[in-house]
Image: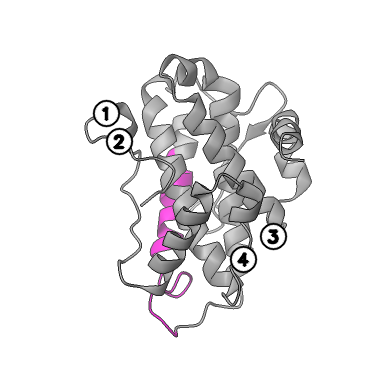
Amino acid sequence: YSFLFTAPVGSRSSKTFKPKKNIPEGSHQYELLKHAEATLGSGNLRQAVMLPEGEDLNEWIAVNTVDFFNQINMLYGTITEFCSETSCSVMSAGPRYEYHWADGTNIKKPIKCSAPKYIDYLMTWVQDQLDDETLFPSKIGVPFPKNFMSVAKTILKRLFRVYAHIYHQHFDSVMQLQEEAHLNTSFKHFIFFVQEFNLIDRRELAPLQDLIEKLGSKDR
C-alpha cells in the first residue's frame, strides 16, 4: 500500500515490478501508515517524516521502508521496457557511478551486471528482508532485532540506487510518461525521511546531490 500513488487499475502506474508488500489492516503498523498518509496530505514533507509522538523509531522506519519499497517498485515498473540488457548493460547513475551487486550470502563477491539484472537482484533481496518476520516483525509486541537499524540502512541505501538510475538514465522516459511529478514527490519524501534519521551516508547520495540540494532549498 502506498499513499503517494492512487493510480487507476489498468493504468501504467498500476504496474509493479515485484509483488506489492502489504501491511496488514488493523495492525499498529497499518495505523502508523495511516498517520503518515494524513501528515503527507498536509503538504509539509519535513514535518510528515518526523517520528510521531510516543511511537517506536524502529517501527516508524519499518513502515516507511516498506512503503518506499512499494513506491520504487511501482516507479520502476513504469519504465522497465526502457531499461534493458542492451540500453543499460551496466547498473549506473550517470558516467561517474557504477554499482556492482553482492548480497553477502548468495553472491559474496561483487559482480558487474546489467541494470535490469541488478535491480531484480536488489528488489528480490529487499523483499526477502521485508518478509523475514525476525527482521520486520508484523505482530504487536514482537521486538525488532538488535541489527534492525543496520539492515534498514542497507535497504534504503540500495533503494536509493534505483532512484539514481531512473533519474540519470531514464528521466526522458519518465517525462514522456508524465510520471515526473510522481517520481519527484516520491524521491523528495524518501530523501527527507533518510535525512531526518541520518540513514544514508552523504557519499552514497553523491549521484543525486544537486537534485537533493534543489529539493531541500525549496523547503527552507
Residue 194 versus residue 180 in the image, above or below? below
Farthest residue, direction left = 10
Q: Are marks 4 and 2 in contact (CB under 8 Å)?
A: no
Residue 37, horizontal then vertical, whole percent: 46, 54
Q: CA distance from mark 4 to mark 1?
A: 34 Å
Q: How many marks?
A: 4
Residues tagged 1 and 2 counted as in contact (Cβ below 8 A): yes
The residue indicated by pointer 1 is 11
Dot placed on the residue nearer the N-terminal end, 4 or 2: 2
- Indicate left or right for 33 with 162 as reference: left
Vertical side of 84 occupied by 47: above or below: below
In magenta, the rendered stretch is: 120-141
**Mark 4 highlights which residue?**
51
Query: Dividing the image into 4 quarters, which one contains the C terminus?
Result: top right
- The residue at 35%/38% (across/down) is 17
Amino acid type, label 4: Leu
Residue found 62% across the figure and 65% down from its top: 51
The circle drawn on residue 197 is 3
Amino acid of disc 1: Ser
Read off the residue under disc 2: 14
Render colour scheme: one colour
Q: Amino acid at mark 2?
A: Ser
Instruction: Give the residue drawn at x 50%, y 82%.
Output: 143
Q: Measured along the vertical axis of the image, is residue 190 above or below residue 13?
A: below
Gap between marks 3 and 2 measured at Cα = 30 Å
Q: Residues within 10 Å of mark 1 (few under 14, many from 20)?
A: few
